[in-house]
Every structure is written in structure tokens, then in C-alpha cells.
Image (cartoon, grey):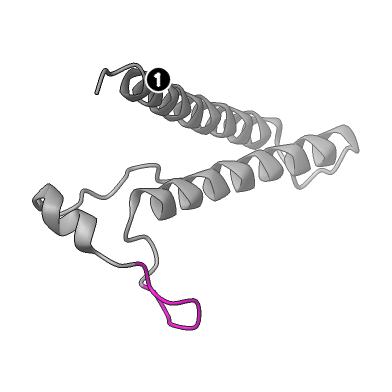
Amino acid sequence: MDLRIASMPSQGLGSIAQTKRPAAGSTAVAGTGFADNFKSALKSVSAAQNEATRLQTEVQLGNPKVSLEETMLAMQKAQIGFQGALHVRNRMVSAYTDIMNMSV
């Protein structure tokens, strides 16, 4: 599970404001913006949590092909991914609050 966010090329604020979103029917390059990267990271965290839940169920049912170590490792990966996503969310909320409290 890779939660790194790709850096954007350095651009001036004017060029960022002038960029247009692709039309509804056109194909866009996946993962080009922060929102796309954040969505893919959340999907990855969700998949890790689903896998950990599946492994927990298999261990509880007594499946000999699923080890307890594998299950615990999947649970820890899911927990670390969730904590990372939670920290990013908290930082985004904090930044939004700071921006909204700025005087114009």
C-alpha cells in the first residue's frame, strides 16, 4: 500500500487558475491532482481494511490456510493507512479553517 502523494510541477498561481477541467465526455489522466491522489489513497486504505476483515473472518472460522501472523500484519497495515488518511484529513480541515479565518 503506497500512500505517497505525487508532487505537482512548480507553476505560478496564474497558470493553475487558468487550467481547465476536462469535459465530461473526454478522458482525463488519472491521478493528476490532489483530489485524484487522495481518492486513490482512500480506496487503497479501504481495500486494506476489507482484506484485514476478510482475514479476521477466515481465522475465526478456523481456515488452516490463513495464518494469525498474516492476519495481524494486515490489521496493522490497515490501521496505519487509516491513521495516515486521518492525519491528512485533519490537516486539510485545519488549513480550510485558517483560510476561512483570514481577513480580506
- Give 19 or 81, whichever is nearer the viewer: 19
- Numbered circles on residues, count: 1
Q: Position of residue 89 (x, y in %)?
A: 47, 28
Q: Residue at x 77, y 43 (%)?
A: 54
Residue 4: name its quadrant: top left
Query: Which residue is rendered at x = 91% and y = 38% of the image?
Result: 61
Q: Is residue 84 above or below residue 49?
A: above
Q: Element under label 1?
A: helix
Q: Is residue 43 left or right of residue 94?
A: right
Reading the image, the residue beneath label 1 is 97
Name which residue lies at 51% across and 24% down: 83
| Residue 64, x across and y down, in percent | 81, 43
Residue 34: percent from left, percent from top? 35, 48
Majority secondary structure in the magenta region: loop
Residue 74 occupies which quadrant of the picture?
Answer: top right
Q: Determine the residue positioned at 58% across, 33% down.
A: 78
In the image, residue 18 above or below residue 80 = below
Q: Identify whether 80 is placed above or below 42.
A: above
Magenta span? 21-28
- Please tell me whether residue 17 is drawn above or below residue 2 in the rendered image: below
Looking at the picture, which amino acid does disc 1 mark?
Thr
Specify the quadrant of the image occupied by residue 56: top right
Is residue 24 one of those drawn in magenta?
Answer: yes
> Left or right: where does residue 34 sit relative to residue 62?
left
